[in-house]
Image (cartoon, rainbow, N blue to C red):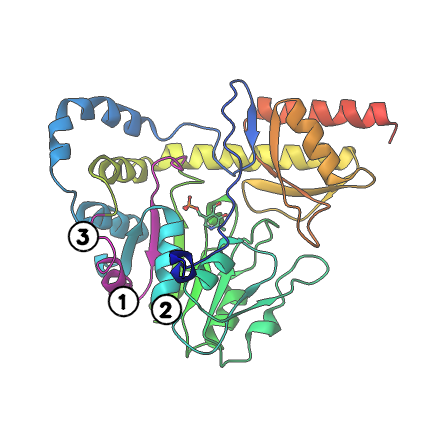
Amino acid sequence: MSWESNVRKVVPYVPGEQPKAANIIKLNTNENPYPPAPGVKEAMERYTERSQELRLYPSPTVENLVKDLAEYYKLAEEQIFVGVGSDDVLATAFLTFFHSDKPVLFPDITYSFYEVWAQLYDVPYVKKPLDEDFNIVKEDYLGGKNGGVVITNPNAPTGIARSREWVEDIIRANSDCVVIVDEAYVDFGGESCLPLIEKYDNVLVVHTFSKSRSLAGLRVGVGMGSKKLIQYLNDVKFSINSYTINRPTLEYASLSLKDEPYFRKCVDQICATREWTMEELRKLDFTMTDSKTNFVFAKHKDVPAEELFEMLKQKGVYVRYFKAPRINEYLRITIGTDEEMQVLIKELELYLKNKNV
Ligand SMILES: Cc1ncc(COP(=O)(O)O)c(C=O)c1O
């Protein structure tokens, strides 16, 4: 018998392309076009003198960063869990909280990693279809008797946001399981469910430093919930890898939290560029969902999304195209700088004009 028959076989998540070529415009993985807070760069420069510290393990409890996060979010330190990006927080949460025979529910069109974790950890799950306009159908989640619920708010790749009250109805109906609210994009115009963690002990709100804080390369994510919930998460984390966040990262993440004016400025600029981009795309006969994120989800009246995706790639503009049912007519375009979005619009305009559509 081959050793391969004993292997755990999974279908992995496929991340967006990270092209190597210089001078491309990268609008395909929802990164932030602006640099991290200036304090991060200064600290990185200073860190070279302290490189001997790297012989020591980092803090397993990441207490300094947890303290700064607690201060920032006005929570107790025991309400905070830190992971290697929110992917790590979410994967640990799936492993910790979804341990039931009943299915975990999430939308059919949402962050596609959820399905990968459910399969990896043998978690039963049901994907609930979004409605025709890509809205999450709240009633699908209100039946109780679930093994867990995952709501992405604002949702991805649709960008559509729901109010805290709307999510609370789902939480209220699911007191027998954990509800994860993935708020990766909430800083770009959503309403956070964070206040609900004081009211419901079964809610985990997940944030990331990758989008609004321009630190995708650092890998920092945060899970926030009741003390009991966070303790369970830490028990699982400490059963896999105690030292998840490296020494310099702990400091850089804290510094990013301490520059609120810079954070606000970048987020406001991205929101303004998003509104401009949407307006220009509308003029070119695109329709879009109402995005409250740092990306838009756009479909052209006549020209297939795949054709536009390939054309833009040829021109050095990378956007995201999902060859999947229901969304294969759409492009997901990350909001870059004004200049980058002007190039995108110019290339689309030229192509559509030449095609006479
Ligand atoms: C909805 C959603 N959640 C979580 C993540 C993971 O982000 P990270 O692991 O960089 O924090 C992403 C990344 O694109 C996302 O779109």
- Residue 61 tag number: 3
Marks 1 and 2, the one that precedes in the sequence: 2
Nearer-the-camera pick, 343 or 124: 124
Instruction: Give the percent coordinates (x, y) of residue 72.
Output: 30, 48
Please give the range of residues in magenta: 214-243
In the image as oriented, which residue stretches furthest toward the front?
1
Instruction: Give the percent coordinates (x, y) of residue 95.
Output: 36, 64
SS state under label 3: loop
Which residue is drawn at the image coordinates 18% and 52% (left, top)? 61
Q: CA distance from mark 1 to mark 3?
A: 14 Å
Q: CA distance from mark 1 to mark 2?
A: 8 Å
Nearer-the-camera pick, 207 or 356: 356
Query: The C terminus lies in which quarter of the figure?
Result: top right
- Residue 232 tag number: 1
In the image as oriented, which residue stretches furthest toward the right?
356
Which residue is drawn at the image coordinates 56% and 59% (left, top)? 162
For disc 3, the neighbor class at 10 Å (few under 14, some 14 to 19, many from 20) is some
Disc 2 vs disc 3: which is toward the camera?
2
* Residue at which label 2 appears: 97
Left or right: 76, with 323 as reference point: left
Which residue is drawn at the image coordinates 18% and 46% (left, top)? 64
In the image as oriented, which residue stretches furthest toward the top?
23
How many numbered marks does the figure carry?
A: 3
Decide if ligand 1 comes within 8 Å of the CB at mark 2. no
Marks 1 and 3, the one that precedes in the sequence: 3
- Tell me whether circle 1 and circle 2 mark residues in contact (CB < 8 Å): yes
Amino acid type at mark 1:
Tyr
Amino acid type at mark 3:
Thr
Left or right: 152, with 54 as reference point: right
Query: The N terminus lies in which quarter of the figure?
Result: bottom left
